[in-house]
Image (cartoon, helix red, strand yellow):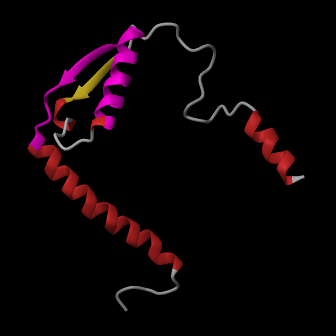
């Protein structure tokens, strides 16, 4: 019975889903402008990742999207932002997971 309920929900239209599109998908992406940050192009990126990135840009362009390089971000800013992200992500994860171990920290 639970499986049937799950299947009926899964197969139904979920209007509140962020990927839901009301109506048909557009035929052309000519009204879409895609910004590609130049600072995100890292020299150490593996070749398969670079190829997939370029294939996605080529596909968007072939569908009519306007691809523009964004140069307002400096590589130094991206590098320091990444370091800050790693520190904050670990702190957030540890504070969120602390509620599940039954202990209070700092006591």
**Identity of the residue drawn at 53% across and 77% down:** 100
- 53 on left or right of 29: left
x, y percent for residue 49: 32, 37
Q: Is residue 47 left or right of residue 105?
A: left
Give the extent of the magenta segment: 48-75
The stretch drawn in magenta includes residue 59:
yes
Q: In which quadrant of the rendered view does residue 40 lie? A: top left
Answer whether residue 93 is magenta in the image: no
Closer-to-camera residue (57/69): 57
Instruction: Decide: is 78 above or below 62.
Output: below
Q: Residue furthest right?
A: 1
Q: How many marks?
A: 0
Q: Quadrant of residue 13?
A: top right
> Would you say 86 lies left or right of 98 here?
left
Residue 40, compared with residue 94, is above or below; it is above
Q: Residue furthest bottom?
A: 107
Residue at 11% x, 40% y is 75
Q: Position of residue 19 (x, y in %)?
A: 56, 31
Does residue 104 sit above or below 90 in this rendering?
A: below
Position in image of residue 54 (x %, y %) = 31, 25
């Amino acid at each position: 019975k639970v499986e049937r309920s799950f299947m009926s929900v899964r197969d139904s239209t979920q209007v509140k889903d962020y990927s839901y599109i009301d109506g048909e998908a557009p035929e052309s992406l000519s009204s879409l402008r895609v910004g590609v940050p130049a600072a995100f192009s890292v020299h150490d990126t593996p070749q398969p990742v670079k190829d997939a990135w370029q294939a996605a840009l080529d596909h968007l362009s072939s569908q009519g999207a306007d691809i523009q390089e964004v140069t307002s971000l400096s590589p130094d800013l991206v590098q320091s932002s990444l370091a800050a992200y790693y520190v904050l992500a670990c702190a957030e994860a540890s504070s969120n997971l602390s509620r599940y171990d039954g202990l209070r920290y700092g006591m």
